[in-house]
Image (spheres, helix red, strand yellow):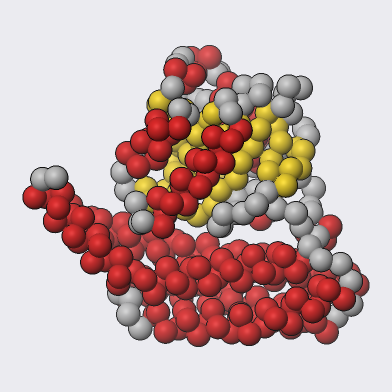
């Protein structure tokens, strides 16, 4: 099944360990990783996306895609397992309800952006990935080992028409990141 | 380890060797995307210098993909074939960027990155489908 997953940590270095862990799982064939990114929420509430340094010609306006995607994990369809941080999220986050979420719609996107705060708290970091997994245990075990919370959402339940979404955020292999700030 | 687990592990190990060609194709495509992205991050003449070294890389990925097609099932072959137009477009845009200057060159590089990324996505989707098919086969 093709899923978006987010593994949230209090410690940024753990998010990178998880990033490498995901690619290791891919290497042994337990999952297939289509793309990954690492994000942080700073003390002012801004989400920062670690992305590869690119030529200005490639640096299109940074959108809200990843923030909104994070928010989608907060709804009832986004399920948290692992650490206690995930408890009660579904009840707390009210913007996005189950079913197909169209991030191309401004109202859905705005609600999702608000809900992102329920998934990624101040000072927390997350690795977000687009994966194909035939069973959940490899990623769940990875998160458990590193002390993170896993959120999943079926990719089929997310519509995203942003043509630059993958090229701006989701890297199809491991990379050494630099930090860019995402404003909204 | 139970007998069933042992058999599953044995099957997975056996499949990994068969999987190898597709994984190598993906690794080559990922490397191509990384190389174009890295070239695009350079300035001035350095961009073109790097892009020159990308032309043979792009050709090698296409050759490697064509070779891999021969050992795939029809379903995977069909999926994998979808990467070919993107790889051809990558080659075309890299070639164009070498001839062009200024904004036209930048636009070609940008397009090359997008196409290389799309090719990686298609190959990864084929790999995922192959792994899922094999996993289903093991567990059925």
Q: Is residue B123 above or below residue B59?
A: above
Q: Relative to A115, is A22 on the left or the right? A: left
Q: Residue at x 73, y 22 (%)?
A: A43
x%, y% of residue B14?
23, 66
| Quadrant of the image occupied by residue A184 | top right
Q: Relative to A52, is A115 on the left or the right? A: left
Name the foreground residue: B77 vs B6. Answer: B6
Q: Residue at x 34, y 51 (%)?
A: A30
x%, y% of residue A122?
66, 21
Q: Is residue B62 above or below residue A39?
A: below
x%, y% of residue A9?
54, 28
Count of numbered circles in the view = 0
Q: Residue at x 70, y 81 (%)?
A: B53
Q: Relative to B11, is A57 on the left or the right? A: right
Q: Is residue A78 visible?
A: no
| Quadrant of the image occupied by residue B93 | bottom right
Name the foreground residue: B9 vs B95. Answer: B9
Q: Residue at x 40, y 79 (%)?
A: B68
x%, y% of residue A71?
58, 29
Q: Relative to A115, is A151 on the left or the right? A: left
Q: Is residue B7 visible?
A: yes
Q: Residue furthest left?
A: B3
Name the foreground residue: B124 vs B83. Answer: B124
């Amino acid at each position: 099944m093709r899923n978006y997953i987010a593994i949230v940590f209090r410690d940024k270095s753990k998010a990178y360990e998880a990033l490498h862990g995901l690619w290791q799982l891919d290497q042994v064939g337990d999952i297939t990783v289509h793309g990954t990114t690492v994000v942080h929420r700073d003390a002012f509430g801004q989400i920062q996306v670690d992305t590869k340094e690119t030529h200005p010609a490639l640096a299109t306006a940074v959108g809200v895609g990843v923030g909104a995607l994070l928010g989608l994990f907060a709804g009832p369809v986004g399920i948290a397992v692992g650490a206690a941080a995930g408890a009660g999220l579904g009840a707390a986050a009210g913007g996005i309800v189950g079913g197909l979420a169209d991030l191309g719609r401004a109202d859905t996107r705005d609600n999702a952006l608000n809900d992102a705060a329920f998934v990624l708290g101040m000072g927390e970091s997350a690795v977000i990935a687009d994966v194909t997994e035939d069973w959940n245990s490899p990623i769940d075990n990875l998160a458990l080992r590193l002390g993170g919370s896993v959120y999943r959402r079926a990719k089929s339940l997310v519509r995203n028409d942003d043509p630059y979404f993958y090229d701006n955020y989701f890297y199809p292999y491991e990379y050494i990141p630099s930090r860019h700030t995402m404003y909204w | 380890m139970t007998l069933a687990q042992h058999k599953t592990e044995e099957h997975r190990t056996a499949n990994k060797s068969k999987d190898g060609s597709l994984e190598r194709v993906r690794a080559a495509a990922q490397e191509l995307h990384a190389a174009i992205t890295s070239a695009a991050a350079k300035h001035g003449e350095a961009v073109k210098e790097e892009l020159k070294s990308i032309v043979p890389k792009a050709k090698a990925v296409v050759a490697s993909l064509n070779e891999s097609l021969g050992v795939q099932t029809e379903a995977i072959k069909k999926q994998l074939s979808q990467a070919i137009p993107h790889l051809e477009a990558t080659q075309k845009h890299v070639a164009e960027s070498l001839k062009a200057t200024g904004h036209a060159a930048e636009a070609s590089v940008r397009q090359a990155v997008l196409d290389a990324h799309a090719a990686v996505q298609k190959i990864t989707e084929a790999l995922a489908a192959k792994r899922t098919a094999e996993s289903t086969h093991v567990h059925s």
